[in-house]
């Protein structure tokens, strides 16, 4: 079961796979169900088989500052989650091997939801996020797009093909009104609706 996030009445409900801690870690046992990994062995990170409110997790998983805000947008990649709040903040958890969580630490996994900061985003209000396999995009209220993660095949839109562990503005002409990261096993694409 792939990861799913739903926002209902300003709350995020999460469920699905958690092998990269994309739901945060550790999850309370009553919310999870053991399953076999791709190698046929029991997974050390059980999946959440039913939706549960993100706010129900301990503060060590979800910061009180995030719990107090309404979730207005969510994006999920192969192994990471990005939540956007009504205050214009973006928060992430999960697989960060290429920096796709927007966290500059060298941690392979971000086990607790953390606010994405730096790269100029602190003075902006994030309104939407999109997540690929190993990259992420954030759209601001002013129409700026910020990218982070692997730059493979130019998916970050910054003219480079290397990974970025901190946010970088995307070079663009005009202001897009929506974002979309598409991903397949063999390739990743970045698409921004509107003028670039």
Image (cartoon, rainbow, N blue to C red):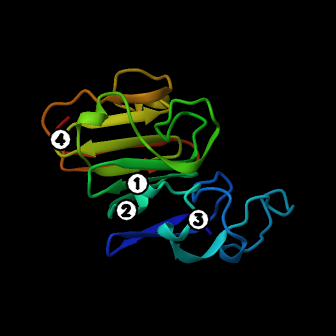
3 or 1: mark nearer the eye? 1
**Label 4, label 3: how far apart the Cα atoms are:** 30 Å
Label 1 close to label 4 by CB (< 8 Å): no
Is residue 187 placed above or below 15 in the rendered structure? above
Pointer 1: what residue?
A: 65
Q: Answer yes or no: is residue 184 visible.
A: no
Picture residue at 32% right of the left edge, 75% below the top:
9
Pointer 3: what residue?
A: 2
Pointer 2: what residue?
A: 68
Label 4 close to label 3 by CB (< 8 Å): no
x and y percentages locating residue 116 in the rendered image: 41, 40
| Mark 4 or mark 3, earlier in chain | 3
| Mark 3 or mark 1, earlier in chain | 3
Pointer 4: what residue?
A: 143
Front residue of 42/111: it is 111
1 or 4: mark nearer the eye? 1
**Label 2, label 4: how far apart the Cα atoms are:** 26 Å
Where, quadrant-wise, is the C terminus in this rendering?
A: top left
**Label 3, label 2: how far apart the Cα atoms are:** 27 Å
Q: Secondary structure at mark 4?
A: loop
3 or 2: mark nearer the eye? 2
């Amino acid at each position: 079961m792939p990861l799913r996030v739903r926002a209902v009445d300003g709350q995020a409900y999460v469920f699905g796979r958690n092998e990269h801690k994309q739901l945060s870690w550790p999850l309370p046992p009553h919310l999870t169900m053991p399953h076999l990994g791709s190698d046929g062995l029991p997974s050390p990170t059980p999946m959440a088989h039913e939706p549960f409110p993100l706010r129900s997790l301990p503060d060590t998983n979800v910061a009180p500052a995030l719990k107090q805000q309404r979730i207005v947008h969510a994006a999920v990649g192969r192994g990471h989650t990005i939540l956007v709040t009504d205050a214009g903040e973006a928060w992430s958890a999960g697989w960060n091997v290429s920096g796709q969580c927007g966290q500059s630490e060298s941690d392979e996994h971000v086990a607790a939801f953390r606010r994405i900061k730096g790269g100029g985003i602190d003075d902006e209000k994030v309104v939407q996020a999109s997540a690929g396999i190993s990259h992420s995009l954030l759209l601001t209220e002013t129409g700026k797009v910020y990218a982070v993660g692997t730059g493979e095949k130019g998916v970050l839109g910054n003219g480079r093909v290397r990974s970025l562990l901190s946010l970088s503005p995307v070079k663009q002409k005009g202001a897009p009104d929506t974002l979309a990261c598409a991903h397949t096993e063999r390739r990743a694409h970045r698409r921004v609706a509107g003028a670039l």
